[in-house]
Image (tube, helix red, strand yellow):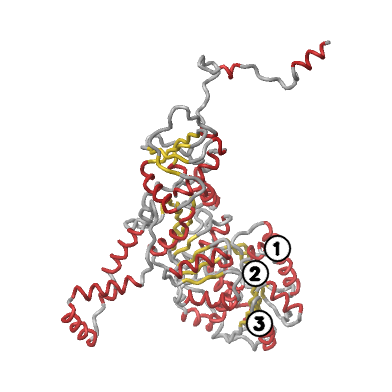
């Protein structure tokens, strides 16, 4: 469906940008009655910025295809973050350029005096963050008297960030007869109350498909050891050849991850709240123009950013809730493109990840980290299909190639080409127990070894607990011993995590644990025992000494704690004498006191 009749200047701007037909949310907005307030919920990447830019055009134009001379602003757009405000400023600038529109940005972190001078020169549209806009209003540098329309973009995020007071101050300062367009990913109770207070007979538009959070995003859960996040991230970036965003929970995590990736040869930038606004702008621009392929960010980048061609999102740290998961993942799969969202899930957080996905209504496929061999195999295929080899050589290049072939031979030239190309590929990392990352033969990339999706939400079930650590009696096991026992207060509650950490294994690889007075013996599956010994050697000196045992524990070992052998039933004649002793009744008191009370 083509765009409806628009002002000629806007139609030219859309045509120059390649907009042939509106997206779903744009079509809904443009079909609404002119001049009406709107309450809109839409997915990220749905084109809502251009949508509301077109929606309030009839409010700004007065019969001509050009806007009147700039003066007090006619439209005000409020956005939660600096990055989103600047992105909206950029979008509206090209949309209204042919119409003579003047768009001014007012965001925190930039020079407020320059913004004040720009406002004094006049503007048609002002885009800003709540705090900075309130500051300009209080200083009387922003004149709201001429506003015909106000847009609240990502209103739910502004409330989550604590901007309610600023929003109410700004809206109360604007003319009562203005149009109000409110956009939010979800219409929660707070958003509904805000709409009732500041909107008049708003038309509700909802283009979100509740049955599928985002049809263009493939979700993957990657089971990893806790100390393998960096290695798994490196191998995933190498296997999925696409611009990527990696999300970390903390600023120091962003720093560490970005430095590690740069050291391994990736073109990566960091994006977090500790950077100045200019540094954040430079980082985003490096991603947009292709100078950086990877952006490592905190959740400051999870809302509103439009980084074109991002094909991969990696959650190095699990999101805290489903909203964060959806907004992080929404950085890919935008504007009809396909994307992949990978959650790095340590074994101990598998259940938390499943609950998070189920709460968001997402079905993810599970697998392990890509192995270094998978990546090398893919690199061989890339070299064989390198597009440079298919290009016809220029005359000058053909003559030089002929001379090189005569001097060195075709094999030597091909080997040199391979070396040069491999230098541009960051080296993959060896990960113990890694298997194929994505099944390239599938129409949609899936992890090898996948046991299928676990759609707990569809079945109305809760994710089940993992089985007990050593319920693997059908697997061949090997015995190991440690230097601690009951005398050292040995207990499986702290021994099991320690064994897993030192030996780089998981709880499912550990079998029975038997604790004696001076030592403890435990089982490791035979399949994991070689890697277990290697990890112990690499770890060096540890809290406890672990070595291979010559066999099962001798007679006299007594299990302890959660791994103890159950006692015989009450009626068993083999029950030891101590179990038949009468229990002490605390209400009766000591026998001596009972005898005295009778006298």
Q: Is residue 199 above or below residue 448?
A: below
Q: Nearer the viewer, mark 1 or mark 3?
A: 3
For the residue labelled by badge 1, is the local secondary structure a helix, a strand or a loop?
helix
Residue 40 placement, left or right of 310: right
- Residue at the spot of label 3: 111
Q: Earlier in the sequence, mark 2 or mark 3?
A: 3
> Of the numbered discs in the image, which one, if any, rests on residue 152?
2
Residue 258 in the image: state x and y as whole percent.
50, 68
Q: Dot 3: within a 10 Å radius of its alpha carbon, few (fewer than 14), some, or many (20 or more) residues?
A: few
Q: Secondary structure at mark 2?
A: strand
Camera-nearest residue between 409 and 291: 409
- The answer to whether the residue labelled 1 contacts the one labelled 3, judged by CB atoms less than 8 Å apart, is no
Residue linked to disc 1: 194
Which comes sooner in the sequence, label 1 or label 3?
A: 3
Residue 436: horizontal and vertical position, in percent? 35, 55
**Distance of mark 2 from mark 3, alpha carbons?**
23 Å
């Amino acid at each position: 469906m083509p765009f409806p009749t628009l002002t000629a200047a806007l139609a030219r701007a859309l045509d120059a940008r390649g907009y042939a037909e509106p997206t779903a949310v744009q079509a809904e907005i443009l079909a609404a009655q002119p001049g009406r307030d709107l309450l809109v919920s839409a997915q990220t990447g749905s084109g809502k910025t251009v949508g509301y830019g077109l929606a309030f055009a009839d409010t700004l134009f007065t019969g001509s295809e050009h806007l009147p001379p700039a003066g007090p602003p006619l439209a005000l757009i409020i956005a939660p973050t600096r990055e989103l405000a600047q992105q909206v400023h950029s979008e509206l600038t090209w949309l209204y350029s042919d119409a003579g529109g003047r768009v001014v940005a007012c965001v925190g972190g930039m020079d407020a005096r320059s913004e004040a001078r720009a406002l004094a020169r006049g503007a048609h549209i002002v885009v800003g963050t709540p705090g900075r806009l309130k500051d300009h209003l209080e200083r009387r540098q922003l004149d709201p008297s001429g506003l015909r329309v106000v847009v609240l973009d990502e209103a739910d995020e502004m409330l989550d960030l604590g901007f309610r007071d600023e929003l109410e101050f700004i809206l109360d300062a604007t003319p009562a007869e203005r149009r109000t367009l409110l956009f939010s990913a979800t219409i929660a109770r707070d958003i509904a109350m805000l709409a009732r207070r500041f909107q008049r007979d708003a038309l509700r538009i909802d283009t979100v498909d509740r049955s599928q959070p985002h049809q263009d995003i493939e979700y993957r859960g990657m089971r990893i050891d806790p100390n393998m996040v960096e290695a798994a991230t490196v191998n995933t970036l190498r296997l999925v050849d696409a611009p990527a965003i990696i999300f970390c929970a903390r600023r120091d995590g962003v720093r560490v991850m970005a430095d590690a990736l740069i050291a391994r040869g990736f073109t990566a930038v960091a994006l977090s709240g500790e950077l100045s606004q200019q540094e954040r702008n430079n980082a985003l621009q490096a991603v947009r123009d292709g100078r950086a392929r990877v952006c490592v960010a905190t959740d400051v980048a999870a809302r509103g950013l439009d980084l074109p061609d991002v094909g991969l999102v990696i959650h190095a740290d699990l999101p805290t809730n489903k909203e964060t998961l959806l907004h992080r993942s929404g950085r890919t799969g935008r504007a009809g493109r396909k994307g992949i969202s990978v959650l790095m899930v340590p074994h101990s957080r598998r259940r938390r990840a499943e609950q998070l996905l189920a709460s968001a209504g997402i079905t993810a496929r599970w697998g392990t980290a890509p192995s270094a061999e998978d990546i090398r195999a893919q690199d061989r295929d890339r070299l064989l299909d390198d597009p440079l080899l298919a290009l016809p050589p220029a005359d000058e290049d053909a003559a030089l190639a002929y001379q090189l072939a005569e001097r060195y031979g075709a094999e030597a030239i091909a080997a040199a080409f391979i070396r040069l190309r491999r230098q541009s590929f960051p080296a993959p990392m060896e990960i113990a127990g890694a298997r194929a990352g994505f099944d390239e033969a599938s129409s949609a990339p899936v992890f090898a070894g996948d046991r299928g999706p676990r759609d707990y939400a569809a079945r109305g079930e809760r994710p089940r607990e993992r089985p007990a650590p050593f319920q693997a009696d059908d697997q061949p096991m090997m015995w190991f011993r440690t230097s601690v026992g009951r005398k050292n207060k040995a207990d499986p509650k702290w021994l099991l995590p320690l064994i897993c950490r030192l030996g780089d294994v998981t709880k499912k690889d550990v079998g029975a644990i038997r604790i004696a007075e001076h030592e403890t013996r435990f089982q490791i599956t035979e399949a994991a025992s070689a890697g277990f010994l290697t990890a112990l050697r690499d770890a060096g000196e540890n809290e406890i000494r672990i070595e291979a045992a010559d066999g099962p524990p001798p007679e006299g070992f007594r299990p302890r704690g959660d791994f103890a052998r159950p006692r015989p039933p009450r009626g068993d004649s083999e029950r030891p004498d101590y179990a038949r002793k009468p229990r002490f009744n605390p209400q009766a008191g000591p026998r001596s006191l009972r005898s005295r009370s009778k006298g």
